[in-house]
Image: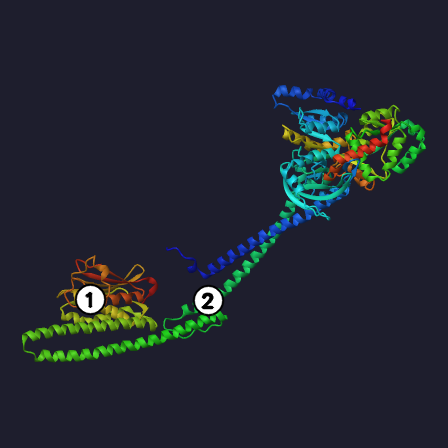
């Protein structure tokens, strides 16, 4: 099977696929946004605890006895216990990096030194924050500063207080998990609604499809359906198209009968003149020409007839309701019609049946098929030959055999027999090359299988099989 | 003073440890007979008297014959130095009641995390109270109030001061008798003394009056609880302020010459805690020991055989954290086992507190 492109897949698949992809994309964006938001809120709230602690320590920095001292209040770290699992590191230092108290090893950190030295000195100190890898884990630090009066004038003192980020991560995770659940639920609901809506839309398309499918071939009246506006447009277009088709078919019907009439009239004139010329002519050479013209004229007549028949058959299948046809009777009628023709050529046409059955089809077309097949058999039989027509049952199938004992057709030629205007190289008589092609067309339209086999000892057997679904036995 | 601290060294402690080995002969013979897996030796460093810990160590060894314990009693400051300087033999477990130093060691990454089943299991999580541990690293196992202790003979016929205000007037009233006879921890060398004193300094408004009275009465400073209890017992001193209750009670049970008083205005409560050292070579056995300390049987034994009140909420005898917390809810002031204690081990704070204390007690030291 060829690879299906997306645009030729079912509309339901396309819609649901596009909707799912879109929803997935939206939820992904939402998830990222929520994660970002969770991170920020965690950052803001926990940063506030840090800077509050730093400010409380800041308030207790004193300069006594030529040195700084800090009596850190008990409450300073209390707010940090809001993150019960996080470790705390802090440092109190001067701008000159003179250690006052806290974790002295923080002074070895390049980033700490940079932050302190680049800290903007302001009247109202604002807390700044930064991340630092310290003692093997990521620490979020807050830094505040204030000028303290000393004996050598005001000096800037810095408080750094940092905390591991476990609680932030837990908060962030909880928040984004909750949001993720919400988003997933929302997307699931939205998808459900979308699928229901898609089904609703496609249902009216299906209804049109059903209405058209249920119709007979010849019903070209407008479709009546109460559907949404957009679907109504489609129905209107289909109805317009059907009206056009109806008028085209009518025209074609007229053309067929007109063409038959128009071609047959001059041909009949030609034939009459030719017959007259044949009677009057004495010159053997002229007579010879005239006989050749007459035979060509006969072929032309037959070709026109076959073409018209084929056109009629095709037209009939588009415009005529199939009806029950008693095949045995039809075959017998056709045989009777052609028996005289066969006898003229000293050919015996025999008929026998072991099954009576009927099919749904068009009588005119089927009789054309039978005529063409039997005429062909006559044409290819030699004088004194026989043709057997037989109807019987093979397994579940009803089968019609038409056997002749002429030269037959080579296996290599059999596939081409059904082409229009194909003429067997063995043909010793004139033919239009249309008969078999018409027969195949009719057989197909009548759900039958037309195949060629060899007769015993030689000759051609045409086999027309009707599968069990398409025929009814008549008892 | 300094040389006294040095005396309290490891060589002396080892002696006690070796004597403890006398408890092991039964398991030794069993090992020879059945060729059992070899004994793992856990080094436990404790700022706690072996006598308090002994029943627990014995019971643990009885239950886990393949684990033997070397117990090294040490002062809290020695303990901290030993761990920070990574001295040998390395500690597998560290036990101490000096909460701020324990918190600081854990904060500085000297502890090995241990996700205890008892803490993660929902059914059991209420049994080990949340206040008794920090991170999955520091595990509190007993809940010990600090007390005032008096010489029994001295207190005879006198009204026992039940709170700090009454104590202040008691000291003033018996000023002559108490001259040179009040004992306090030397907060420069005794970690628990420093922690309790700096905690009081935050909690009590009359803290300054105490300093003044101690100064006025030539208060004597002691480098250990046992030396102070000894002095109390033989009348060298008549009262001691802010002593670890567990030790005082054990002494009282043995000698019956002391009176132990918990102040009913407020009583600071210390949580004695243990952590697994990060450098341990036997994490599995160390975890087993912590499991034991917090197990029902371990805590039950603690309640029955020692004066360390257990923390488990399913042990509710009179000598248990649960009972005390229920009974004396508005009297107890437990020190929180969390980072807020870090401020007490702050360098600058220590300078301030000790300078203050030295200034007050200077001339008699």
- Give the letter of the chain under mark 1: A
- Look at discs 2 and 1 and give the one toward the viewer: 2
Q: Residue at x 65, y 21 (%)?
A: B30
Q: Residues within 10 Å of mark 2 (few under 14, many from 20)?
A: some
Above or below — where is A378 with respect to A62?
below
Q: Secondary structure at mark 1?
A: helix
The scheme the figure's colours follow is: rainbow
Residue B4 showing in the rendered view? yes
Between the C-alphas of marks 2 and 1, the distance is 49 Å
The residue closer to the viewer here, A16 or B305, is A16
Above or below — where is A227 with respect to B120?
below
Q: Residue at x 19, y 73 (%)?
A: A300
**Residue B332 horizontal/vertical position (percent):** 81, 39
Q: Quadrant of residue A164?
A: top right
**Residue A223 horizontal/vertical position (percent):** 43, 73
Above or below — where is A370 with respect to B358?
below
Q: Is residue A285 left or right of residue A447?
A: left
**Residue B352 horizontal/vertical position (percent):** 79, 35
Residue B163 showing in the rendered view? no
**Residue B215 horizontal/vertical position (percent):** 88, 31
The residue closer to the viewer here, A263 or A368, is A263
- Give the letter of the chain under mark 2: A
* In the rendered image, residues at marks 2 and 1 fall on the same chain: yes
Q: Is residue A337 left or right of residue B202?
A: left
The residue closer to the viewer here, B249 or A299, is B249
- The residue at which mark 1 appears reads as A376
Q: Quadrant of the C terminus of chain B?
A: top right
Which of disc 1 and disc 2 is earlier in sequence? 2
Q: Secondary structure at mark 2?
A: helix
Q: Residues within 10 Å of mark 1 (few under 14, many from 20)?
A: some
Q: Quadrant of residue A389?
A: bottom left
- The residue at which mark 2 appears reads as A205
């Amino acid at each position: 099977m060829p690879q299906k492109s997306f645009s030729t897949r079912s509309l339901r698949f396309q819609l649901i696929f596009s909707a799912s992809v879109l929803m997935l994309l939206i939820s992904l964006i939402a998830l990222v946004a929520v994660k970002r938001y969770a991170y920020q809120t965690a950052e803001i709230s926990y940063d506030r605890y840090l800077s509050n602690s730093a400010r409380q320590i800041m308030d207790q920095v004193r300069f006594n006895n030529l040195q700084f001292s800090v009596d850190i209040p008990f409450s300073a770290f209390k707010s940090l216990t809001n993150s019960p699992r996080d470790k705390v590191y802090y440092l109190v230092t001067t701008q000159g990096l003179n250690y006052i108290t806290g974790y002295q090893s923080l002074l070895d950190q390049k980033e700490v030194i940079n932050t302190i030295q680049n800290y903007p000195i302001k009247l109202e100190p604002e807390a700044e924050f930064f991340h630092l890898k310290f003692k093997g884990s990521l620490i979020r630090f807050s830094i505040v500063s204030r000028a303290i009066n000393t004996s050598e004038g005001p000096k800037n003192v810095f408080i750094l207080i940092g905390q591991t980020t476990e609680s932030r991560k837990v908060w962030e995770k909880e928040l984004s998990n909750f949001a993720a659940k919400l988003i997933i639920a929302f997307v699931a609901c939205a998808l459900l609604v979308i699928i229901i809506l898609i089904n609703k839309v496609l249902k009216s398309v299906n209804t049109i499809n059903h209405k058209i499918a249920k119709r007979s071939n010849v019903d070209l009246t407008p479709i009546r359906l109460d559907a949404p506006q957009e679907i109504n447009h489609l129905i209107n277009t289909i109805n317009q198209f059907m009206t056009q088709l109806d008028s085209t078919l009518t025209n074609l019907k007229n053309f067929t009968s007109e063409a038959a009439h128009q071609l047959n009239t001059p041909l009949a004139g030609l034939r009459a003149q030719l017959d007259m010329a044949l009677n009057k002519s004495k010159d053997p050479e002229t007579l010879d020409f005239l006989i050749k013209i007459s035979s060509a004229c006969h072929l032309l007549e037959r070709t026109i007839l076959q073409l018209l028949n084929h056109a009629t058959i095709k037209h009939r299948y588009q415009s005529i309701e199939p009806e029950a046809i008693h095949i045995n009777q039809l075959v017998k009628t056709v045989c009777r019609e052609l028996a005289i023709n066969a006898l003229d050529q000293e050919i015996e046409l025999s008929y026998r049946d072991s099954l009576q059955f009927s099919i749904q089809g068009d009588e005119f077309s089927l009789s054309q098929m039978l005529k063409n097949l039997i005429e062909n058999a006559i044409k290819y039989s030699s004088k004194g030959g026989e043709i057997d027509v037989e109807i019987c049952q093979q397994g579940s199938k009803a089968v019609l055999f038409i056997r002749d004992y002429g030269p037959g057709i080579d296996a290599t030629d059999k596939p081409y027999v059904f082409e229009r205007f194909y003429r067997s190289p063995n043909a010793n008589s004139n033919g239009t090359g249309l008969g078999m092609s018409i027969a195949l067309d009719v057989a197909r339209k009548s759900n039958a299988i037309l195949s060629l086999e060899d007769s015993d000892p030689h000759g051609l057997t045409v086999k027309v099989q009707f599968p069990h679904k398409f025929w009814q036995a008549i008892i | 003073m300094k040389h006294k601290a040095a005396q309290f060294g490891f060589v002396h402690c080892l002696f006690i440890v070796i004597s403890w080995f006398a408890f092991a002969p039964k398991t030794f013979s069993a090992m020879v007979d059945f060729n059992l897996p070899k004994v793992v030796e856990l080094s436990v460093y404790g700022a706690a008297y072996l006598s308090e810990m002994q029943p627990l160590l014995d019971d643990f060894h009885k239950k886990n014959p393949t684990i033997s314990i070397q117990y090294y009693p040490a002062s809290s400051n020695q303990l901290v130095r030993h761990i920070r300087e990574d001295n040998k033999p390395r500690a597998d477990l560290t036990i101490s009641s000096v909460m701020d130093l324990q918190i600081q060691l854990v904060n500085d990454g000297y502890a090995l995390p241990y996700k205890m089943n008892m803490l993660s299991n929902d059914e059991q999580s209420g049994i080990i109270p949340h206040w008794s541990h920090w991170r999955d690293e520091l595990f509190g196992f007993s809940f010990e109030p600090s007390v005032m202790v008096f010489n029994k003979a001295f207190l005879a016929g006198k009204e026992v001061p039940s709170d700090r205000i009454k104590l202040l007037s008691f000291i003033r009233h018996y000023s002559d008798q108490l001259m040179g006879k009040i004992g306090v921890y030397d907060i420069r060398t005794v970690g628990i003394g420093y922690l309790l004193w700096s905690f009081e300094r935050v909690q009590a408004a009359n803290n300054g009056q105490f300093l003044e009275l101690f100064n006025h009465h030539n208060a004597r400073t002691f480098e250990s609880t046992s030396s102070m209890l000894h002095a109390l017992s033989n009348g060298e001193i008549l009262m001691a302020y802010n002593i670890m209750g567990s030790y005082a009670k054990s002494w009282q049970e043995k000698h019956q010459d002391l009176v132990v008083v918990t102040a009913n205005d407020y009583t600071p409560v210390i949580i004695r805690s243990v952590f697994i050292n990060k450098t341990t070579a036997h994490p599995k056995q160390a975890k087993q020991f912590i499991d034991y300390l917090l197990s029902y049987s371990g805590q039950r034994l603690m309640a029955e055989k020692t004066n360390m009140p257990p923390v488990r909420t399913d042990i509710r005898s009179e000598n248990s954290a649960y009972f005390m917390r229920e009974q004396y809810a508005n009297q107890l002031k437990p020190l929180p086992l969390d980072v807020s204690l870090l401020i007490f081990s702050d360098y600058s704070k220590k300078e301030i507190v000790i300078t203050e204390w030295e200034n007050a007690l200077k001339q008699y030291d």
